[in-house]
Amino acid sequence: MNWKQPKVYAVKHKDEATRAASRSGGIFTALSDQVLSIGGVIYGCVLTDDFNAVHIRTENEEDRNRMRGSKYIQSKLGDTFKSVKEDLDAQKSVLLSGTSCQVAGLKKYLGKEYDNLFCVDIVCHGVPSKKVWDAYLHWQEQKNHSKISSVDFRNKKDFGWHDHVETLYFENGKSTSSRVFKELFYGHTVLRPSCYECPYKSVMHPGDITIADYWGIEKAAPEFDDNKGISLVLVNNEAGEKAFEKVKEGLIWKQTKLEDSMQPPLKAPFPKPDNREQFWSDFENKSFEYVAKKYGGIGLKNDAKSLFRKIKRKIKKLVSKGGKRNTSTI
């Protein structure tokens, strides 16, 4: 049973390579490493070659590493719940990572408590429409005259942890870094209708541990913030506390105050935007170029800011590495 209030921690993995490969501070890797070390099974979300988010099952590090990082689209669960139950009944230790509604759905499906199940849910902003994501990718392929080869939803390596820029890599060797999908996402018009009434937009979550980017770290623990990624960890019950104790040795951590950590998704669902119906009318009837300009932040002012960022970034790279890179920012 979960506590009435979680214990809150700021966390970063001691291994810098692990933290660099993670979206925030690397807590998911630490927790899943512990489960793998005892022969357990990990279920989590990966991005497929055709850029769908799906949940997979793994017992190895290689596939677990594919679960790192944010995917700002809804994952397909397939037969995940059935597979989890089979593993649990076979007495395997299981870690499942997902959104709060996915974790709650699994527990409802199982119908009883399992001592060998450990659930990690994420602080979810909301789930955007896959239809919009597909249209965005198609638009970028047309603009760049090439198929997309890979996607980084938030390019921490080039832009730092605080920024949110998706970078698309193309088969012709080009890349483009964009804030368009981010602008659509944070405009909330692309979220699923159920997200506006989400019961998990609070500090109470169904997971044993809840994780997120630690937005607000500059107030909660400013000495931790090096722009390389910090995990917010909410320990929700005794099982979560035991798991956290097992991995603490590999982490740099600090207990923080809940009141200093209250980012918007921990308070209430985002309200349905007044322009949501207009957005979907435009999306269905206009070109994506029109949608990107109207809702995605494209324009002279944004272009000027992007150009300035690009120049600064290239100067920094030339000074520090003496190299250059073929990239554009939209």
Image: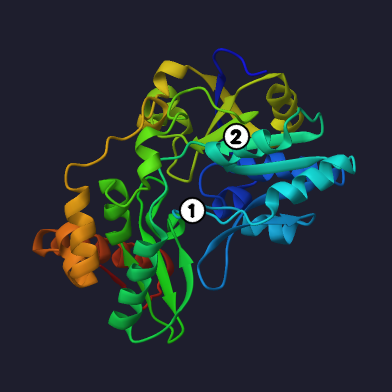
* In-image side of 24 versus 118 (left or right): left
How far separated are the C-alphas under marks 1 and 2?
15 Å
Looking at the rendered structure, the secondary structure element under dot 1 is: loop
Residue 138 seen anywhere in this rendered image of the structure: yes
Q: Quadrant of residue 254?
A: top right
Q: Residue 166: image x %, image y %?
A: 38, 61
- Residue position for label 2: 104
Residue at x-position 77% and y-position 42%: 94
Q: Which quadrant would the N terminus be assigned to in this image?
A: top right
Q: Residue 229: image x %, image y %?
A: 49, 43
How many C-alpha atoms fall within 10 Å of the one at disc 2: few (<14), some, or many (≥20)? Answer: some
Question: Compared to 32, does 324 lie above or below?
Answer: below
Q: Residue 111: image x %, image y %?
A: 72, 31
The tag earlier along the polypeptide, 1 or 2, is 1
Which dot marks residue 282?
A: none
Q: Nearer the viewer, residue 263 or 313?
A: 263
- Residue position for label 1: 74
